[in-house]
Amino acid sequence: MTYAEPTPAGQAPRGVPARVPHLPALDGLRGVAILGVLLFHTGRLPGGFLGVDLFFALSGYLITDLLLREAAATGSVSLAAFWGRRIRRLFPALAAMLACVALLVRAVAPPDTVRTMLSDGPWVQANLVNWHLLAESAGYWDRFGAERVFGHLWSIAVEEQFYLVWPLVVVAVACVGRGGLREGRRVGGAGGADGGVAVAAAFASAVSLVLMVSLVNEADPSRVYTGTDTRAFSLLLGALAATRPVRAVLERTGRWAGTAAAALAVGIAVLWLLADGTDSLWLFTGGLFAHSLASALLIGLCAQAPCSLVARALSWRPLRWLGLISYSLYLWHWPVIVLLTPERTGLDGWAWTASVAAVSIALAALSTYLVENPIRFRAAWARGRRGAVAFGAAMAALAVLWVALPAPPTAAVDVTLLE
């Protein structure tokens, strides 16, 4: 969920052209998204899971914006540099959470939780856990129980798969559109790579929608909800909103941009209040697509009209701060919920919700300021050859962890009781 975040104001990743001015409203949108997910997982907002779609749209928008600006400024896209930035952005916090939670779960959790954690861990590490869970026929809406401490990471896997494939599409489209990036031509004008990328994103999102509608199972929509192919439209619609043709359309809203953004925000809020993942089949026959489209347009309008009422409301400092720690908050909140159950804490209702939210936010802040930001912005060793070695070593250490942690013995069954 994203996790293509803008860098701090005025700062650009190395090897990437200077960024457009930082947009605080997008941080606020990220804060809204993580609040929705938190309230959903604590049973307070049935439609809060739609925050994931908002994250997806943000990811598609920001990543595509980054790629297109790099192509426009340099005539090329450095895939190695792009993937290196993604690794530095996402992997350190994920690896730290996986290691800490694995050791804690092995020490204090029930045997069933330990077994599923050890089973799911390698697939999380490989960014394929969504397909692993589907292969196990683990229903999404039943998955979030005490036995599945990494169940929420399906969405991170979807984003990682998108980050692997979409830049290749952008480069291929840019090459076809300009006779090859290697000729050193600069990308410019409304035509450039943007038009081709817009067509590719629109076409692929339509295909993804068709797949969702045709594959949905009314009894259990888990396959279409967590499958990368059927959820890709959420990311692709965000990508579409980042292209010049769509931005040109949004620019024509002029003084009505703020009104349009407000209408979209209200529509999204209504969907969050009405949606229920288990009983809302309409979500999987176009509802999720409509929500993702509204999210993508809202993102585009916030970028187009940063002084509008909605953009200024989303720029509220506490909401922005929550957005800035949202990646680590997403990583940590579900393990906290699993381990700090109402039974263990002696709390229930909003008191329990507040307690797990406070613990999750504290852990997320520690992760952001002690792990994410130092490695992402200041650690010279995390780049180049040394960075590749460090990444390989960390991946190997995690792989060893899943094997070295002993699984609890299977409970013996007294067959005499079956007679």
Image (cartoon, rainbow, N blue to C red):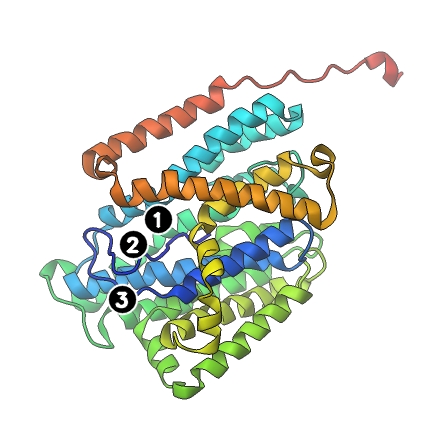
Regarding mark 3 in the picture, which secondary structure is present there?
Answer: loop
Earlier in the chain: of badge 3 and badge 1, it is: 3
Determine which residue is flagged by label 2.
168
* Image position, residue 273 (x, y; %): 66, 65
Regarding mark 1 in the picture, which secondary structure is present there?
Answer: helix
Earlier in the chain: of badge 3 and badge 2, it is: 3
Label 2 crowd (10 A; few <14 / some 14-19 / many >=20): few
Q: Amino acid at mark 2?
A: Leu
- Residue that appears at 62% across and 43% down: 356
* Image position, residue 313 (x, y; %): 49, 70
Determine which residue is flagged by label 3.
20
- Viewer-proximal residue, 294 or 371? 371
Nearer the viewer's eye, disc 3 or disc 2? Answer: 3
Label 3 crowd (10 A; few <14 / some 14-19 / many >=20): some
* Image position, residue 130 (x, y; %): 52, 44
> Mark 2 near mark 1, Cβ–Cβ under 8 Å?
yes
- Residue that appears at 51% across and 57% down: 231
Which quadrant would residue 76 be assigned to in this image?
A: bottom left
Determine which residue is flagged by label 1.
164
